[in-house]
Every structure is written in C-alpha cells, then in structure tokens.
Image (cartoon, helix red, strand yellow):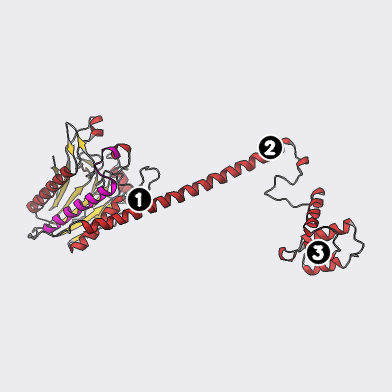
Amino acid sequence: MTQTEFLELLNKYDEEHLSEDDLFEIGVAHKELPLGMKNWSKLNEQLGMPFTTGENYRCWVKQRLARVGELPKNVKMLSNKTVDELSQEEITDELEEQMRDLYKQQVKTRDVHREYRNDIRMDARWENLAQEIKRILITQKPLSLRPVEKIKGTAEAICVISDWHIGCVVDSFYNQFNLEIAKERIAKLRDYTLKYCKQFGVRKLHILNLGDLIEGEIHTTARVTNEMDTIGQIKQASELLSQFVVDIASEVEQVCYRSIADNHSRVIQNYKENLDGDSFVYLIDWILEMKLQLAGVTNVELCFDNLSDNFGLFCLDCGKQVGFSHGHRQNVNTAFQSFVGATKSYVDYIIIGHYHSSRIKEFNAAKVIVNSSLKGTDEYALSKNLFGHPSQTLLVFDDGNDLSFVINLD
C-alpha cells in the first residue's frame, strides 16, 4: 500500500466515532506501508489517542491478526500457531530442530575462530623467524668462490643431496651422527663430487636437493634427540648448503640448483593440518639465494620451476627427462607410473630420497634412483633391523652413457 492510498483510506472513517473494527482495519493498512513511511505513534495521535502509545497500538493489531490466523509466518519463530495450539510432540520437534541448527552454527563459528587463532600464531612465528633470519645473515661469514681453474669438459652430471637431518643426534653401536660429523661428511661429499667431475670432464652439474636437510620437530622423538631447535637447524643447514654450492661452483663451469618440499621440514607438526607449501625448504632456498647474491656468485642458476610442491621435472642437455620428488608420497615400485601420469609424458629418470637407503630399479627402460641419507642408520632404523651406510649419489651423463656413483660417507 502507498502513502496516498492509506490517506484516502483514513478519509473514509469518522475519527471521532472509531470502533475496534475500524481501528483494526486502519492498523492493518498502516502495517502494509513501506518501512520508512510507518509511524505508529503519529497515527495513534491522529486517531485521538485510542491507545496509550503507538507501540501498544501496533502490538494490539499484531495480536488480533494472530488470533484470526492472518499473521505472516516468521521463520525465526517456532510456529504460526500459538503455544496453546501446539501439541507437546510438535513443540519438542520444533525445539530439537532449532537446537540442531544452533549447534551447527556454533560448530561453524568455533571452526572459524580456531582457524583465525592458528593464523595469528603462524604470523607470530613467521615474524620471529624473519627476525632471526636477518640476524643470521648478518652474523654469518660471507661466502666466497675459491680461486681455482674451472673444469674442462662436455659431460653433464647430477649431484643428489637429501636427508641430511641437521640437528639430529645419533649415538649407537652402529652409527654416530651430530653437527660436527655432518660437516665432515658434507666436506667428503664435496671432495668426491669434484673428483669425479674432474675425472669425467663435467661442464654442467645439477645439484638436486630432495629435502629433509633439517631434522625438524615433527614428532616427540625428534624434539628429544635434537641438539638444536628448528631455527638453529635452519641456520646450520642453510650455511652448510650455501658453502657446498659455492665450493662446487668454484670449479664447475655451470651449476643448476633445484629443490623440492619434504616431510621433516614442514612448518606444522601435524601433517594433516600442514600444507605441502608450508615448508622450511623454501626458507632455506631463500637464504641460499640471498647468500649467493651477497657473495657475487654468477654461475649458479636457481631453478624454482617445479610442477608442484611434490613433483619436479627438468630436461638434460642430451634430451633425457628427469623427474624428482622427496619420496614421502612415493612408492619405489609405483614412482614411474606416478610421474608418467603426472607429467603425461615419458620420464627417463625418477630420483627420490626419504628411504635412507641407496638403490636403483628399472621400469620400462626408465630408472628409479633412490638416494640414501647423510645421517645414516638411527635408533628408529635399528628398531626395525634396517642397516645402511650414510651416502649420497652422483650421476654422470657422458656420450650416451649414465654412470652412477654412490659416495660412501662413513
């Protein structure tokens, strides 16, 4: 109803002799006016104050509409019926339905609040981490290329590094491992890598970081046996990785560095809540990039062009395709099918880590190469009667041949 129509309706009544039916009809018409045009107090005054207040007038009209069953249904109310008209069963059903809806809304609200609190906690952790990183980069000694002559040749190679687990301590009858031993083993890996690069004339070397360079704190055992916290692990791992890359780049003409997400470097301990992209691997890579820039190293190419957080693919100069992954989401026997399915193309070499043992398996003329670890056998492996030597892998591609070297580091 428009305001003009309502005024025309009022003119039909004698305001000095209004019956209850007249007041009701006028009130119903007033109720149908647009929200901005309704004024119950003014209407009550205009009609000679038949009610104490305008609000009393509005409630009286509403109650009379309810009695005759013409009050529009409010979805927030239990029913159009009055409480007296509802049976006990109807009241119970209506209440249970509303209680279910209310509980659902409460659960949704709690979930939103929990995610919000998690985001705040993660922001605080990252801010603290960023401050520590700035301090680390300032306090660490600068990197420098060694003044040696570059290797002459045409061969291409892949140096596979993975599962260094910096921060972990192993002390058993079978194996010992800590930060100082890790440094010795990395130095040995560097020396043997350069030895074979010189022997076969490697011009281009791919350093393939398959992850787990830090032990992390993904379970209680790791937190108990670690000799340093996560920030300390990142500091040491980034320093060792950066120096290793620079030492290799001092003698190899062209170095290409690649990496992939893993499981021990995940930011959130619970793997069900952690996203693959939430990984300290990317933080270590960023520190490496900054340190290479500060050192003025120009012959190292950082190739951050993976297909996803779990799949990487690149092509050798000879045309062979190489796929790589950390391995925690891969099975050795199905890795070939996984990579072919993911890339929709034939993959000649699939390289994974994670399993802490060195092996090579062949599937449809493609080779699945598993890299071992720098840490070697730990307490968990001993409890499963799994024994192995710490080692890393070097693959040399020369004149159509591929040569595989397992560099033992104990």
Q: Nearer the viewer, mark 2 or mark 3?
A: 3
Which label sits on residue 92? Answer: 2
Residue 404 visible? The answer is: no
Which label sits on residue 278? Answer: 1
Residue 162 visible? The answer is: yes
Packing grade of label 1 (10 A; few <14, some 14-19, many >=20) is some
Pinpoint residue 43: horizontal percent, then vertical percent: 81, 64
Check if mark 1's residue and mark 2's residue have beta carbons within 8 Å: no
Looking at the rendered structure, the secondary structure element under dot 2 is helix
The residue wearing badge 3 is 43
Of mark 3 and mark 1, the one earlier in the sequence is 3
3D distance between C-alphas at marks 2 and 3: 41 Å
Of mark 2 and mark 3, the one earlier in the sequence is 3
User: Which residue is located at x 26 percent, y 50 percent?
Assistant: 234
User: Which residue is located at x 13 percent, y 48 percent?
Assistant: 187
Q: Residue furthest right?
A: 17
- Residue 268 lies in magenta, yes or no? no
Looking at the rendered structure, the secondary structure element under dot 1 is loop
User: Which residue is located at x 71 percent, y 65 percent?
Assistant: 36
Q: Residue 219, located in which quarter of the rendered image?
A: top left
**What stretch of residues is rendered in magenta?**
223-250
Number of callouts: 3
Q: Residue furthest bottom?
A: 4
- Residue type at mark 1 is Asp
3D distance between C-alphas at marks 3 and 1: 65 Å
Of mark 1 and mark 2, the one earlier in the sequence is 2
* Residue sitting nearer the eye, 276 or 62: 62
